Image: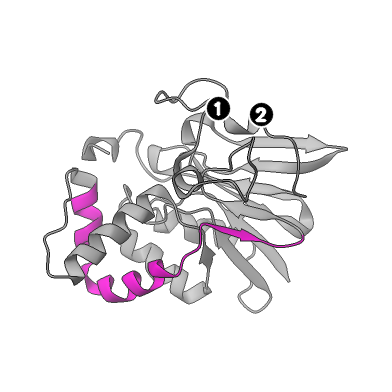
Amino acid sequence: MRTIFVGDTHGCAVELQDMLAAAAYDPSSDRLLLTGDAFARGPDPLGIWRQIQDTNAKMVLGNHDAGLLDSLEESAAGREPKLKKADQRYTFAKLAPAHGEILAWLRQVPLYIETDDFLLVHAGINPEKGLAGTSREEFITIRTWPPAKEHTGPRWHDAYQPAHPLIVFGHDAPGGLVVKERDDKAYLLGLDTGCVYGNQLSAYILEEARLVRVPSRQQQGEWLQRDA
């Protein structure tokens, strides 16, 4: 069995299909793991949901997924969800045919997936307190260290001392692809390469120690106008 990690898809369903083809994904022998932020901001969140179902993909919770979960919970309780941004309203509307299914699924999506071979998180872990001391907010939003509101500055993984065989994360499109190695072997991978912004979708095949990247089909800035 191969393990294929895919960075933040953000509603880019066609690119995810391109990635599965480029990685020669075999549903009978491969497992697909997503870094989170699956649906928001991009053109086809419902297409992403269908591919998650078709592949039985597993995922860790991202900050946009957490926001979507809150909105779905509000709607299920008969309250109007607070969708302040255009991209949030777009995603919520496009997912309408599957709201109930997605709500049930998101309720059980974990903050991290850990095995003997890897740790998968959305944003990262607290580099001082480690996995056990990482808060929910840090799991889904951590980027800089020390924490800062700006997207620039030293990253959490610059202060991280390897304590896991491999950490795979997403979330940090401004930081781009991150590959850190020790003894010629990767111990940290950041796979959010801004597909929704017109860049690339990135994946990593664990057993082959191989990165796979496919170009975005989005026009640069096309989805930024959704006030994301």
> The residue under label 1 is which amino acid type?
Trp
Instruction: Identify whether 40 is placed above or below 1.
Output: above
Alpha carbons under labels 2 and 1: distance apart: 7 Å
Instruction: Identify whether 55 is placed above or below 22.
Output: below
Question: Taking 138 as reference, is 182 left or right?
Answer: right
User: Which colour assignment does the render follow?
Assistant: one colour
Quarter-wise, where is residue 101 in the image?
bottom left
Q: Residue at x 11, y 60 (%)?
A: 80
SS under mark 1 = loop
Residue assigned mark 1: 145
Q: Is residue 82 magenta?
A: no
Question: Taking 87 as reference, is 40 left or right?
Answer: right
Q: Position of residue 150 (x, y in %)?
A: 41, 23
Instruction: Identify whether 39 is placed above or below 223.
Output: below
Residue assigned mark 2: 159
Is residue 23 something one can see in this rendering?
A: no
| Residue 82 vs residue 98, the one in the foreground | 82
> The residue under label 2 is which amino acid type?
Ala
Quadrant containing the N terminus is bottom right
Q: Give the extent of the magenta segment.
A: 88-116
- The tag on residue 155 is none
Quadrant containing the C terminus is top left
